[in-house]
Structures are given as structure tokens and as C-alpha cells.
Image (cartoon, rainbow, N blue to C red):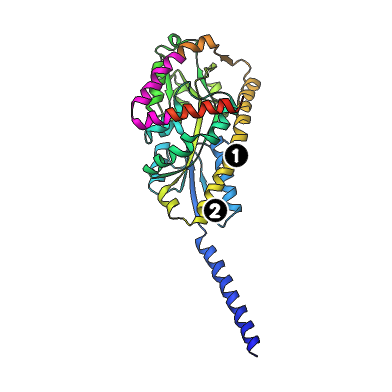
């Protein structure tokens, strides 16, 4: 009789434990909000959807995605994330320089390589990204999850240019929030005009600006080739993006959820590295097929030389702004040198 009572008690206890566990999982299931500066089919969207799918397949949590324009401009989304209204943020590094000055590192001209193998190695192994930037993000109320490339920058204009002299007086739209982008186009001879993405289309249609820069996936997707006449590869940089979380939200999570989010970020990072190169090629391929009269120019090394020379002043300016800027730029250059050596 005693054995039966013990067995019965054990079964009751087991059932109670399972019920408590199930209830706890249900209670802690949450809907997290993720806003980004691009659409769901764009690189940031591909990253976000891979992140979302991993979270939802490996937990009871769900993620609601807010694409570009859903919650205001880039600065609005940044403020909402820092305030804890949003849990996650996907944003171009070019927009972040005004908030996190060190992020202008990724918009410096003629620093990042154009070789995709070198880029992949750099973004996976860089000490500047993986060791130096996370505590800097923490100071701004954010938890850095990933930084990844979206494609080589191309410049679209109404007229051909082959030298800084050709750009003299040309009004070039640049992303707002990045002092380095303004300095870059001034160094290149142009007159930079900081402008939100929402205003760019109208500005091109009304000739308020004479050109802009973006990776080809964006140029093709949003018909920027049909609003200009020439696309030029200058080799001056890549378009990069970041994914981050609100730090307070992240810090208050249990270890299981922190590990889940880190794993989701690693998964999404791998996916976007595989897809970004395809998207870049797809963008230029579509432009060639659908807009055969559109002129595509690749500057020669000789033509790039004066742009590279002008870029040195911008790099020096970035380093001179703070000890933190100089330290992270020095580490980035070391990381890129390692990436070049490792991918030969």
C-alpha cells in the first residue's frame, strides 16, 4: 500500500512539475518588435526574416517586422529602440554615425575592399567589430548583434564623371546623420546634400539633386536607374548594415533567451553573407536587361587615383575626431590586412 502511495505521489509531483514548466514557457512567450530601414525583400529584410524564423522555430516567442517607412525615418526608429519601444533594430551603418560616431568607420572612402571573400572574412573575424564595437554600442543603450555588407556602392548621376573636377558643383544626395559622408563628397569635389530616403525620389525627379549613391540591388529595386542616366563604379566603398537590440531588454532576459538571440543573429548573418553577393549581381543584371540604354561606367585605376588621394584627408579627419575613432580605425586596418592575407 505504501509503495502504491509513493508511486501515486511521484506521478502527481511529476505532473505538477510539467504543468509548471509548460505554464512558465507560456507566460514568458512574448512578441518582440523589429524595425528596419529596408523592405522585406531587401538585404536587411532577408536578415530580419532569417532572424525571425530562427527565433520562432526555436522558442514560443514571435517577432513582428516593421519594414522601412512603417515607424518613421531612420532617426525615429533609433530613438524608439533606445527608448525600449522596439526590441530590435536593423539600420544602415551610414545612418548611425550621428548617434554612434565610431560607426562612420564603415562609410570611410577607399578603406573597405571590393573583394567579396575578403569582406566575408572581415565581417566574421574582425576584432574591431566583434570586440571593440559591442561596448561602444552598450554606451548608447544598444546591444550589437551583427554588422554585414549589402553590396558595392555605385553612384548614379545625370552626367558622366571621371574625376573630382567633373563633380564640381554637382549636388549629391547623401544619407543624413553621417558627417563623414558629407566630408567624402566635399573631398570628391561635389556639393553633398543630406536627405532622407523618402525625399530622394522626388529630388531626382525635380533635379533638386544631381546624383546619389547606393548598391545596385537598391538602384534596380527602386527604379533609380530610370531616374538618372549613368551608373558609375568608383570602388570607394560598400553599403553596410547593422542589427542591434535594446540593451535593457537584452540584459533582463534569461540566459536561454540571450543564447537564442545570439544564435539567431549568427544564423541570419550566415544567410545574408550568402545572399548579398547574389543580390548585387542580380541588381546590375536586371538593369542591363531592362534598361539597355543606361550607361554603366567603371572608373579605371588611373581615374580612381585622385579620388583615393582625396579620401586620405577624410580618413585622417575621422581618426582625428577622437582617440576611440583612431583606435578602432587602426584595428580595422589590421583586420582588413589579415582578411587579405587569409583569402589569397
Relative to 18, is 67 above or below?
A: above
Name the mark nearer the viewer: 2 or 1.
1
Find the residue positioned furthest to the bottom.
1
- Between discs 2 and 1, the one toward the N terminus: 2
Q: In this view, does 136 lie to the left or right of 147?
A: left
Of residue 118 and residue 73, the one placed in the foreground of this image is 118
Mark 1 element type: helix
Q: Is residue 152 left or right of residue 75?
A: right
Q: In this view, does 192 lie to the left or right of 227?
A: left
The residue under the point 58% across, 16% down is 296
Residue 269 in picture, x, y percent from top left: 57, 39
Can residue 293 be seen in this snapshot? yes
Of residue 233 and residue 11, the one placed in the foreground of this image is 11
Of residue 70 and residue 142, the one placed in the foreground of this image is 142
Residue 26 in picture, x, y percent from top left: 54, 63
The residue under the point 47% across, 26% down is 333
Segment colored magenta: 308-329
Residue at numbered disc 2? 62
The 10 Å Cα crowd at callout 2, few under 14, some 14 to 19, many 20 or more, is: some
Distance between the alpha carbons at the discs numbered 2 and 1: 21 Å
Residue 2 in picture, x, y percent from top left: 63, 89
Q: Which mark is residue 270?
A: 1
Residue 77 in picture, x, y percent from top left: 42, 41
The 10 Å Cα crowd at callout 1, few under 14, some 14 to 19, many 20 or more, is: some
Relative to 207, is 93 above or below?
A: below
Q: Which image quadrant: the C terminus?
A: top right
Q: Which image quadrant: the N terminus?
A: bottom right
Amino acid at each position: 500500500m505504501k509503495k502504491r502511495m509513493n508511486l501515486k505521489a511521484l506521478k502527481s509531483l511529476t505532473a505538477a512539475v510539467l504543468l509548471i514548466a509548460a505554464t512558465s514557457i507560456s507566460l514568458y512567450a512574448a512578441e518582440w518588435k523589429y524595425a528596419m530601414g529596408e523592405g522585406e525583400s531587401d538585404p536587411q529584410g532577408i536578415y530580419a526574416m532569417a532572424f525571425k524564423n530562427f527565433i520562432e522555430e526555436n522558442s514560443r516567442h514571435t517577432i513582428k517586422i516593421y519594414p522601412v517607412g512603417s515607424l518613421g525615418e531612420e532617426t525615429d526608429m533609433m530613438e524608439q529602440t533606445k527608448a525600449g519601444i522596439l526590441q530590435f533594430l536593423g539600420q544602415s551603418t551610414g545612418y548611425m554615425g550621428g548617434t554612434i560616431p565610431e560607426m562612420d568607420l564603415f562609410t570611410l572612402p577607399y578603406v573597405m575592399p571590393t573583394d567579396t571573400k575578403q569582406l566575408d572574412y572581415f565581417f566574421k573575424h574582425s576584432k574591431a567589430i566583434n570586440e571593440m564595437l559591442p561596448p561602444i554600442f552598450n554606451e548608447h543603450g544598444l546591444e550589437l548583434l551583427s554588422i554585414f555588407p549589402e553590396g558595392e556602392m555605385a553612384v548614379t548621376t545625370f552626367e558622366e564623371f571621371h574625376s573630382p573636377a567633373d563633380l564640381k558643383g554637382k549636388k549629391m544626395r547623401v544619407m543624413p546623420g553621417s558627417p563623414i559622408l558629407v566630408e567624402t563628397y566635399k573631398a570628391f569635389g561635389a556639393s553633398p546634400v543630406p536627405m532622407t530616403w523618402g525625399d530622394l525620389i522626388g529630388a531626382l525627379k525635380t533635379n533638386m539633386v544631381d546624383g546619389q549613391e547606393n548598391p545596385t540591388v537598391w538602384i534596380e529595386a527602386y527604379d533609380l536607374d530610370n531616374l538618372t542616366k549613368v551608373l558609375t563604379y568608383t570602388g570607394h566603398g560598400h553599403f553596410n548594415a547593422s542589427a542591434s537590440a535594446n540593451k535593457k531588454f537584452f540584459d533582463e532576459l534569461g540566459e536561454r533567451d540571450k543564447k537564442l538571440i545570439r544564435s539567431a543573429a549568427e544564423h541570419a548573418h550566415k544567410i545574408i553573407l550568402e545572399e548579398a553577393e547574389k543580390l548585387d549581381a542580380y541588381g546590375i543584371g536586371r538593369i542591363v536587361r531592362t534598361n539597355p540604354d543606361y550607361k554603366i561606367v567603371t572608373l579605371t585605376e588611373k581615374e580612381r587615383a585622385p579620388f583615393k588621394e582625396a579620401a586620405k584627408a577624410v580618413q585622417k579627419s575621422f581618426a582625428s575626431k577622437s582617440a576611440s575613432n583612431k583606435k578602432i580605425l587602426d584595428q580595422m586596418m589590421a583586420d582588413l590586412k589579415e582578411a587579405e592575407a587569409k583569402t589569397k
